Image (cartoon, helix red, strand yellow):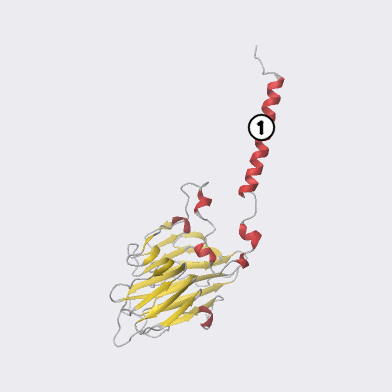
C-alpha cells in the first residue's frame, strides 16, 4: 500500500514554498524584472543629447540573463554592430583614450569608423599620412587646436573635418566621446579640401524630393571632398520611399530613436547606439518606429568616379 506523507509535513512544505514565493516576488520587483525601465520613470527628455550612444539600453548587466545573445550580424555586404558587442582597446598613440572600432577595411570598407572615448587629460594622435579625418562629438566637450595655435571648443553636436596631413590635436580635460571617420584621401586635380568646423543646428535643411525625412549635410558638396556626412531625421512612422541600391558605401550610427532597417534580404530592429556598414549595392531601407524621432549620422563617399 502506498504511504502518503503526514499532513503536518505537507503543511510545512507549503509554508516554506509560500515564503519563498513571496521573497522571489520582492526580489523581482526590486531588480526591475516587472518594473518600468528607468527611462520610463525619469523620462528620456531629462537625459543628455545622444545619451543612448554612450549609455545603451542593452548594457552588459542586462545581458546576464541572456548568455550568448547579440543582435550583431556580419555579412559579406553589410554589418550591424550593436552595443553589447563593443570591445574597448587603447587607441594607438592617443593619450588616455579607448577606442571601439565599428567599421574597418577588414570588412571590405575603404574607410574606418570608430568611437573614441577620451578620459581626463586625454589627447588625440595624428592620422596616417594622406588620411583625412572627421570627428563628431556625442558626449562631453573637446578642444581642437591646429598648427597656427588657434583653438576651437567643440561640444555635443559639433563636428570638424581635418584635411589630409593637416596638423592638429584634440584635447579633453574631462571624459568625452567622439565618432571618428578616417579614410585615405582620393586626390582630384587641383581640388583641395579645407578645415571645416560647424554644428548640426547651423546646417540648413535641404530639399529631399520624393522623401519626407529631414536632411542636413555637414560638409561642403564641392569636388574637393571625396565623402560627406549627413544627419537624417525621421519622425515616428516615417520611412525611406526609395529602396536604395547604389555604388556608394555607408557607415551609419544611430544617435536617437529606433526602427527597422532592411539590409539585403534581412530585416533588423535597430536603436540608438547601433552602427551599420553597408557595402556597395546592398539593398537598404529604413522605417522609424517608437514615440520619438530617429536621428542618424551617415557617411557616404561622393564626387569620385567609381572606376
To which quarter of the image does residue 12 belong? Answer: top right
To which quarter of the image does residue 163 belong? Answer: bottom left
Above/below status of 195 relative to 79: below
**Residue 14 placed where, x, y %?**
69, 29
Near-viewer residue (188 or 203): 203
**Residue 305 placed where, x, y %?**
33, 79
Q: Residues within 10 Å of mark 1 (few under 14, many from 20)?
A: few
Quick check: can you spot residue 171?
yes
Residue sitting farthest toward the top: 1
Number of numbered tags placed on the structure image: 1
In this picture, residue 133 sits left or right of residue 239: left
**Residue 189 placed where, x, y %?**
29, 86
Q: Secondary structure at mark 1?
A: helix
At a point 55% along the width and 64% down the height, the residue shown is 258
In this picture, residue 258 sits left or right of residue 22: left
The quarter of the image holding the C terminus is: bottom left
Quick check: can you spot residue 282?
no
In this picture, residue 106 sits left or right of residue 287: left
**Residue 247 placed where, x, y %?**
38, 72
Residue sitting farthest toward the bottom: 190
Above/below status of 71 relative to 20: below
Can you identify the residue that label 1 sits on?
A: 17
Amino acid at each position: 500500500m502506498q504511504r502518503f506523507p503526514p499532513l503536518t509535513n505537507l503543511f510545512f512544505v507549503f509554508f516554506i514554498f509560500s515564503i519563498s514565493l513571496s521573497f522571489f516576488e520582492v526580489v523581482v520587483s526590486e531588480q526591475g524584472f516587472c518594473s518600468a525601465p528607468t527611462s520610463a520613470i525619469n523620462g528620456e527628455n531629462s537625459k543628455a543629447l545622444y545619451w543612448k550612444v554612450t549609455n545603451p539600453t542593452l548594457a552588459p548587466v542586462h545581458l546576464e540573463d541572456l548568455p550568448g545573445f547579440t543582435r550583431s550580424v556580419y555579412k559579406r555586404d553589410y554589418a550591424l554592430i550593436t552595443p553589447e558587442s563593443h570591445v574597448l582597446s587603447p587607441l594607438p598613440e592617443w593619450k588616455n583614450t579607448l577606442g571601439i572600432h565599428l567599421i574597418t577595411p577588414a570588412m571590405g570598407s575603404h574607410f574606418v569608423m570608430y568611437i573614441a572615448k577620451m578620459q581626463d587629460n586625454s589627447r588625440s594622435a595624428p592620422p596616417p599620412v594622406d588620411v583625412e579625418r572627421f570627428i563628431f562629438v556625442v558626449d562631453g566637450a573637446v578642444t581642437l587646436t591646429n598648427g597656427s595655435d588657434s583653438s576651437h571648443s567643440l561640444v555635443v553636436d559639433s563636428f570638424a573635418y581635418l584635411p589630409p596631413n593637416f596638423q592638429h590635436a584634440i584635447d579633453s580635460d574631462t571624459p568625452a566621446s567622439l565618432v571618428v571617420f578616417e579614410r585615405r584621401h582620393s586626390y582630384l586635380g587641383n581640388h583641395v579640401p579645407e578645415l571645416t568646423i560647424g554644428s548640426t543646428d547651423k546646417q540648413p535643411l535641404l530639399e529631399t524630393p520624393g522623401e519626407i525625412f529631414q536632411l542636413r549635410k555637414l560638409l561642403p558638396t564641392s569636388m574637393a571632398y571625396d565623402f560627406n556626412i549627413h544627419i537624417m531625421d525621421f519622425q515616428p512612422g516615417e520611412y525611406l520611399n526609395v529602396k536604395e541600391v547604389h555604388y556608394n558605401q555607408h557607415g551609419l550610427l544611430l544617435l536617437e530613436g529606433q526602427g527597422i532597417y532592411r539590409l539585403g534580404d534581412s530585416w533588423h530592429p535597430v536603436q540608438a547606439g547601433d552602427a551599420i556598414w553597408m557595402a556597395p549595392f546592398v539593398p537598404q531601407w529604413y522605417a522609424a518606429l517608437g514615440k520619438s524621432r530617429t536621428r542618424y549620422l551617415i557617411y557616404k563617399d561622393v564626387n569620385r568616379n567609381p572606376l
